[in-house]
Amino acid sequence: MSRFEFIFVLISIVAGLALTRLLSGLTQSLRRSGREFDIAHILFSLAIVVLLFSIWWNSFRWEDNEVWTYTEYSLLCVYMSMFYAMAAILHPLNSPAVPRFDGIRTQFYVAFILYQIVESLVVYIRDGNVAWDYLAVVIQVGVLAAIGIYLRKSTFDKFLAAWILLTAIALQFLSRMTG
């Protein structure tokens, strides 16, 4: 077993736990009858699923890394753990009901901003630089999340959730078409 395979077994387990939490939480949200759908909550859950699939797929870019430092290893563990943290905020275990997004807004946005920072560090360590267009998207989304914390408006949350979901999907299609 190579170091890459050894490290990514743990990374895959954490990613799988996050994905399980998100998908089971989404199905729980959809099964609840007599309750209005929380669009922001559902869109953010879907966005995190898309981002998680993307990150999991892109993890193969580390395959050629022959020398692993503890910093790289621990940063990747923290990085994948951010997905689990966001999934846990969106869909807490043993909760009788899925929380409304306005009740978890600050925690989720703070976790999402931290995820953006950690992802930028991971990209920098992996590639040796951070592309300006990627950095612009990261800064934009981080600023919008901070604005969401400040505004505390459901309409803004829905807009931002849709924006992040559509941006994540668009970036996946662009990255697949451009290599």
Image (cartoon, rainbow, N blue to C red):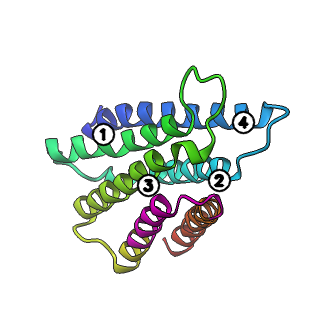
The residue that disc 2 covers is 40
The residue that disc 3 covers is 58
- Camera-side residue of 140 and 103: 103
Identity of the amino acid at label 4? Ser
Image quarter of residue 69: top left
Identity of the amino acid at label 2? Ala
Q: Which of marks 2 and 3 is nearer the N terminus?
A: 2
Residue 61 visible in the shown view: no
Q: Which residue is drawn at 51% across and 49% down?
A: 105
* x, y percent for residue 102: 58, 48
Q: What element carries label 4?
A: helix
Q: Nearer the viewer, mark 1 or mark 4?
A: 4
Gap in Å between the C-alphas at discs 1 and 2?
28 Å
Q: What element carries label 1?
A: helix
* x, y percent for residue 49: 57, 47
The residue that disc 4 covers is 29
* x, y percent for residue 107: 44, 45
Gap in Å between the C-alphas at discs 2 and 3?
26 Å
Magenta range? 139-155
